[in-house]
Amino acid sequence: MSVTGEAVVDVPFSTLADTVMERLTTTYAAAADPGRAESMRAYMKDVAPFLGLTTPVRRTLSRTVVEGLPRPAEVDCTAIALRCWQLPEREYHYFAVDYLRRHARVCSSGFLPVARHLVATVSWWDTVDALAAHVVGALVAADPKLTADLDAWIADDDLWIARTALLHQLRYKERTDTERLFTYCLCQSGHPDFFIRKAIGWCLREYAKTDPGAVRTFLARERGRFAPLSVREALKNIGA
């Protein structure tokens, strides 16, 4: 059971979502490539079935889906994301992630449980990392009180929730809460899973672009607590 628990997230009514989903499912299904879908599913470790849409094709189709539609409100983002996640094919999840990245500013702190549901459902790096950096990160930046939630997420039993906490400041640069970043890394320093160890190195490496001295000092003091993978990734661009 997760430390922070998993709230039940209902799909709200949204006329805009009705329009988007009708366009989306029709447009994507018409362009499906079953042969390519099998290789894509295998590459992504069978996390979900695919329609077989390459990224360039999918993004071109997505533009036609949303063409001429109004800017969404938070309720529309919620409905579209959750309804996409109810569909099995991974490209629909990608559409939802891209849509949320584009419209994250219309979402309030109340959207965080929805983001958590998306992270914790059909979880793999291909959706989790973008949700962490571009959606959860944007929500926390807009409402710093949400750091209390992320402080719980970092200790969650679900590694994808913990990974999201590690990566949510990935784009913050000078706005990074350095103490929280280092504390999160230390909190998960003994985690046995590759995806957590990699995330520790990634978020430290990214912050090193802003303050390499702080990362060097931190690892000089604490590197014995981290897996070699984490240290190697963190120092990749700045050296020991």
Image (cartoon, rainbow, N blue to C red):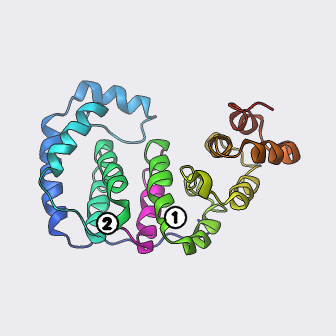
Q: Which kind of residue does numbered mark 2 sit on?
A: Thr
Cα gap from disc 2 to disc 1, whole angstroms? 19 Å
Residue 69, percent across and down?
A: 14, 57
Quadrant position of residue 20: bottom left
Relative height, residue 74 to residue 34 (above, below)? below
Identify the residue shown where x is 77% and y is 44%. Answer: 213
Identify the residue shown where x is 66% and y is 60%. Answer: 177
Residue at which label 1 appears: 141
The total of numbered circles placed on residues is 2
Q: Which residues are magenta?
A: 107-124
Q: In terms of secondary structure, where does tag 2 sit?
A: helix
Residue at which label 2 appears: 78
Q: Is residue 110 magenta?
A: yes
Label 1 environment density (alpha carbons within 10 Å; few <14, some 14–19, many ≥20): some
Q: Is residue 214 visible?
A: yes
Q: Nearer the viewer, mark 2 or mark 1?
A: 1
